[in-house]
Image: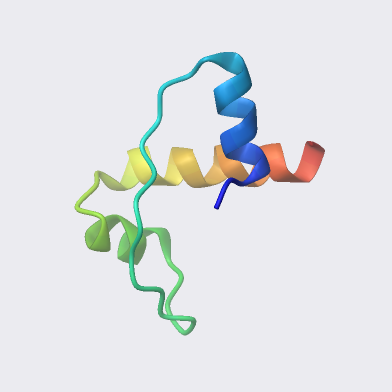
Amino acid sequence: MKTNAVRVLDNLGIAYELRDYDVNPDDLAAETVAAKMDCRQNKCLKRWWFEAIVQAFC
């Protein structure tokens, strides 16, 4: 599914990678998501903030 954040990245020509992971509604911490995605926490958090900002203003 394309989110507004993904559409913005496409329009700007910015490379990205979408990843799926199992969501636990009781634990949505960035550290948990980073561990599930095998991703450095600061990199994942930056992605999350970018997407949240884009969705809020687009």
The residue positioned farthest toward the right in the image shown:
57
Question: Compared to 35, does 28 lie above or below?
Answer: below
Q: Looking at this view, is 6 or 30 the one in front? A: 6
**Residue at 41 percent of width and 74 percent of height:** 23
Residue at image position (30%, 55%) is: 34
Q: In the image, 37: left or right of 50?
A: left
Residue that sits furthest to the front in the current view: 1
Residue 40 located left or right of residue 11: left
Where in the figure is residue 21, as x and y percent of width and height? 33, 64
Residue 29 location, quadrant:
bottom left
Residue 10 spot, x, y in % from top left: 56, 24
Q: Quadrant of residue 16?
A: top left
**Is residue 44 rendered to the left or right of residue 25?**
left
Q: How many marks?
A: 0
Nearer to us in this view, 6 or 24: 6
**Residue 39 in picture, x, y percent from top left:** 24, 47
In which quadrant is the C terminus drawn?
top right
Judging from the image, the colouring scheme is: rainbow
13 w.r.t. 4: above or below: above
Q: Residue at x 41, y 58 (%)?
A: 30
Outermost residue toward the left in this view: 38
- Residue 43 on image: x %, y %: 35, 38
Residue for point 46% across, 84% down: 26
**Which residue is most to the top?**
13
